[in-house]
Amino acid sequence: MSDVSGAAASWAAVGRARDTGGDPFFRRITGRPAPGEVLVEGMLAINAASGDYLGLASDPRVREAAAAAARDLGASCSGSPLVIGTWSVHAQLAEELADFLQRPAVLLAATGFQANLTLACLFGEDRAVIADRHIHASLVDALRLGAAKNRRFRHNTPRHLAQLLEEASGQGLSPVVLTEGAFSLGGELAVLPEIADLGGRHAAMLIVDGAHDIGVLGPSGRGAGEHLGCEQKIDVLTGTFSKAFGAGGGFIAGSSELIEHCRVFGHAAVYSASMPPPTAAAALAALHIIRDESERRAVLSHLAHRLHDGLAELGHVRPNWASPIVALPAGDADQCLHTWRAMLEAGVFVAPFLPPGVPPGQSRLRLSVTAAHTDAHIDHILEVVGQFLPSGDTAGVAAEPVPCPAS
Ligand code: PMP
């Protein structure tokens, strides 16, 4: 079989990397010695691979909330939300999150992935789901589980979305538009105002996965919709507590009727054991910090701008987006893994992305900044990027929308 997506080549490259310098994936994290740093199998590195954007996973208040819940309530609910898994802490989290997001209702799920899978119950055969080509694997799986006709529009390209919306209307199907707010690989923001306007013209339901932007973007932290001034046009938000909230678990936020439908038909959320009480308590403590301490977003924004400015000085293209994620071109899978390893040895832990997650020959190294970093961390990251990823002739690839066969 031909290796069109590049998956086999990546797998072979991972094997070679494993033989020479250790497996790049499933690396064992052996400690968290200081905010923004990790021990990777004993090697001290700046953690530039984490989604803990506000540094809340190690905030003493979040840790203490988890510890107190573990002491008072135990380590697990040992049951699904439907039967024995909705405890006061879950109810409070769902209510306060709905309030924060200014949505009528919220349904919790054990992970962000499961929250997205739950969306399958909205994708009936009378619907056409038109999704961005770069959506996360959990949304791709929700499309597979659902009965709706589904089409993919070119990444962040409203013109193509418009064409697919026209086609869906012509077929008498009710349209649903599905996208992420800030995209997980490159951090670019969806052009939500245009997408929302187009959707509105076709009476489409707009669903936005805010995994990487809720808590991070917008003056109040409500995400990309708030940041871009169009949040009222978003019908359904999904998200995770594993990134900006520094905890774990996921959610869907929307109208009361929609959430009621998900409570009845959303198998992934309601037939799987609930978020463990310590995790729910940690998410609740984090929600209070996200709501009350906007200065954390200011610190994050300062550090993200420093990183973007520094990368621009090194000759990498400055992205025109505001999120703390950036993905740098790193050549083919072997080159990418070689650079990844060299950066780790130089004290910077980043995330490698290989085909089929990216197109063949266009592997990336993703860097993420968090509020737990310091200016000195950013300086060191830039120094190491300058040493191992001189922009060269691949510069600019990261700023282009690319087809992503795997998603
Ligand atoms: N959506 C997006 C866009 C993601 O990047 C992720 C995780 N990387 C998820 C959903 C799933 O979230 P979780 O890891 O909390 O299950």
Image: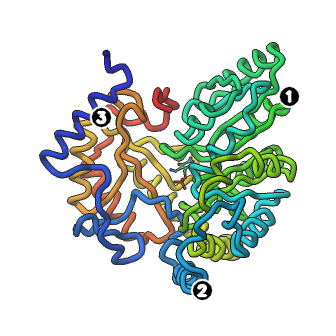
Query: Given the image, on which type of amino acid does mark 1 rest?
Result: Arg
Residue 34, image x, y percentages: 37, 77
Q: Is residue 213 left or right of residue 92?
A: left
Q: CA distance from mark 1 to mark 3?
A: 41 Å
Kindly identify the residue that appears in the image at 42 percent across and 69 percent down: 375
Kindly identify the residue that appears in the image at 51 percent across and 32 percent down: 407
Q: Are marks 1 and 3 in contact (CB under 8 Å)?
A: no
The image's mark for residue 331 is 3
For the residues carrying marks 2 and 3, which lies nearer the camera in this image? 2
Mark 2 / mark 3, whichever is N-terminal? 2
Residue 38, image x, y percentages: 33, 69
The image's mark for residue 201 is 1
Q: CA distance from mark 2 to mark 3?
A: 51 Å
For the residues carrying marks 1 and 2, which lies nearer the camera in this image? 2
Q: Is residue 301 visible?
A: no
Which SS class for mark 1?
A: helix
